[in-house]
Amino acid sequence: MQARALSAITLCRTAALGGHANFCLECGWREEPSYNSCRNRNCPKCQALAQEHWLASRSEAILPVPHYHSVFTLPEDLRPVGHSHPRELYGALFKSASEALLELAKSRLGVTLGLTLVLHTWTRDLRFHPHVHILVSAGGLTLDGSGFNHIPQKFLLPVKPLAKLFRGKMLDALRKLQRESGLSMTAGAFGTLMASLARQDWNVYLKRAFQSPGFVLAYLGRYTHRVGIANSRLLNVSDEAVTFRTKDGRAATLTPVAFLQRFIQHILPDRFKKIRHTGLYGSPKALAAAKSHLAIIPAQPEQRPTWEEALAALTGKDVTRCGNCGSSLCRILIPPLAAFLRRSRRPGSRSPP
């Protein structure tokens, strides 16, 4: 899993993956070859278009009400479990955090909220720090489905009861995991861990609501497809050291091996969903009922833009037009380098020039 991700990132936008070259029949202009992206979700270079497509799809689902930003963080004691059983621990984090919010909202507010959850596992210096960002609708469908109640924008739920409920649900989930599959620890070590976790105050953060749904989506977009580090944060890379920006103008310097060791901690298990929707946002029927009470007319589905159109909207550059005269470009496809190598090894075939 980790080796595949690192291999994909290494080959991203190189001749190994193939690509294309554009040229203009009108003026003879030619561009340098553009090589294909790896499309790996852990690659810092491959997330911009994926993020735009995701935001476009979510713009129809999100309710036109203010939204809160909440963060649920796992204690440091659980980091070894995250390393050895990431799928199980992250799944329990998603389930416990969402259930805590939904249950407390039902008991105290009498509504079903809409939640969108995004898993992050890193700090700014790439240390292991599993937490989930949650976008919470400032209002919800009444429990009998008869209406939609708006929530004051300065206060959603009390944080201390929310944190205690989250802690209780996570502890129950850990006991279940230990019974069913084991967590690679003895009964004594597990008991010590559980006692320590039960004594701690767990960290739950809840920020006041954002007003505009458009701003909510733009804000959420900063979290959905982010990986541990962006290329823009790299200050210097050499055979001896990697220096990158961390927080508040500071920087960290690591050996290349140490840098990669920190980076691969954040490669998620195969097919693990790091973005999830629950409550109103996880039920098309409940969401439709909420929209009905808010008198929202369902939008007509729009045709998904091509990658060229999406790139033009994102960067302002039309890759289908000549950069010199503006005429339409012709495109030559460049096969992946592996295809050339396979051909060159066949008996009687010519080696590539």
Image: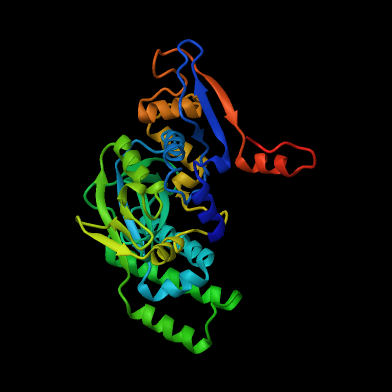
Residue 11 position within the rendered picture, expressed as x and y whole percent measured from the top left: 52, 47
What is the x, y in percent for residue 47? 44, 43
Figure check: 248 above or below 79:
above
Quadrant position of residue 350: top right
| Frontmost residue, 181 versus 286 | 181
Position of the N terminus by quadrant: bottom right
Relative side of 164 to 153, left or right:
right
Q: Is residue 173 visible?
A: no
Return the residue nearer the eye: 109 or 146: 109
Q: Position of residue 310 (x, y in %)?
A: 44, 29
Q: How many marks?
A: 0
Against 323, is 134 above or below? Answer: below
Instruction: Give residue 290's position: percent from left, percent from top.
Output: 42, 38
Residue in front for this viewpoint, 336 or 217: 336
The structure residue drawn at horizontal position 25% and vertical position 59%, both measured from the top left corner, is 251
Residue furthest bottom in the image: 188
Is 328 left or right of 323, judged from the image as shown? right
**Left/right of residue 340 with respect to residue 319 in the rendered view:** right
Question: Which quadrant: the C terminus?
Answer: top right
Displayed quadrant of residue 220: top left
Q: Residue furthest top?
A: 26
Q: Is residue 72 visible?
A: yes
Q: Nearer the viewer, residue 69 or 83?
A: 83
Q: Quadrant of residue 45?
A: top left
Q: Which colour scheme appears in the figure?
A: rainbow
Looking at the image, which residue is at 51% across and 26% down? Answer: 306
